[in-house]
Amino acid sequence: MQQQAMANATSQRRKAKITQAEAALERIAQGEFGYCAECGEDIAPKRLNHNPSVVTCIICASG
């Protein structure tokens, strides 16, 4: 039972990562990748290198 729950959780995390990657690819296709979805400013390259699926700059993510 516990193994099944762990497998389900792992599967859900994988699906979420795939969804995030697909969204990042869509933002690239639309020319929106690297820009904050809230304020429109550039997202720091270090932040994008760490997690390419982020959609907000650090300021908007913090606030």
Image (cartoon, rainbow, N blue to C red):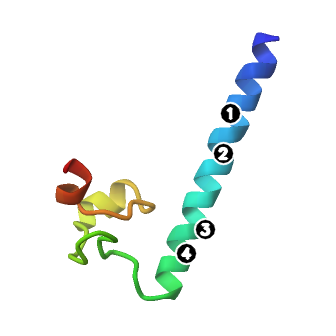
- Mark 2 neighbour density, 10 Å: few (under 14) some (14–19) many (20 or more): few
Residue corresponding to mark 3: 22
Give the side of residue 6 with respect to residue 56, left or right. Answer: right
Give the spatial CA distance, label 4 vs label 3.
5 Å
Give the spatial CA distance, label 3 vs label 2.
12 Å
Proximity of marks 1 and 4: CB atoms separated by less than 8 Å: no
* Amino acid beneath label 3: Glu
**Where residue 34 appears, x then y in whole percent?**
33, 75
Residue 11 position (above or below residue 5): below
Give the spatial CA distance, label 1 vs label 4.
23 Å
Task: Give the residue at the far top of this rendering.
Answer: 1
Give the residue displayed 76% in from the left and 27% down from the top.
7
Label ID, residue 10: 1
Q: Quadrant of residue 51?
A: bottom left
**Where residue 6 appears, x then y in whole percent?**
71, 22
Give the spatial CA distance, label 4 vs label 2.
17 Å
* Amino acid beneath label 2: Arg
Give the side of residue 59 with respect to residue 19, left or right. Answer: left
Give the spatial CA distance, label 1 vs label 3.
18 Å
Proximity of marks 4 and 2: CB atoms separated by less than 8 Å: no
Residue corresponding to mark 4: 25
Q: Which quarter of the rendering shows the N terminus?
A: top right
Residue 43 position (above or below residue 17): below
Proximity of marks 1 and 3: CB atoms separated by less than 8 Å: no
Residue corresponding to mark 2: 14
- Mark 4 neighbour density, 10 Å: few (under 14) some (14–19) many (20 or more): some
Proximity of marks 2 and 1: CB atoms separated by less than 8 Å: yes
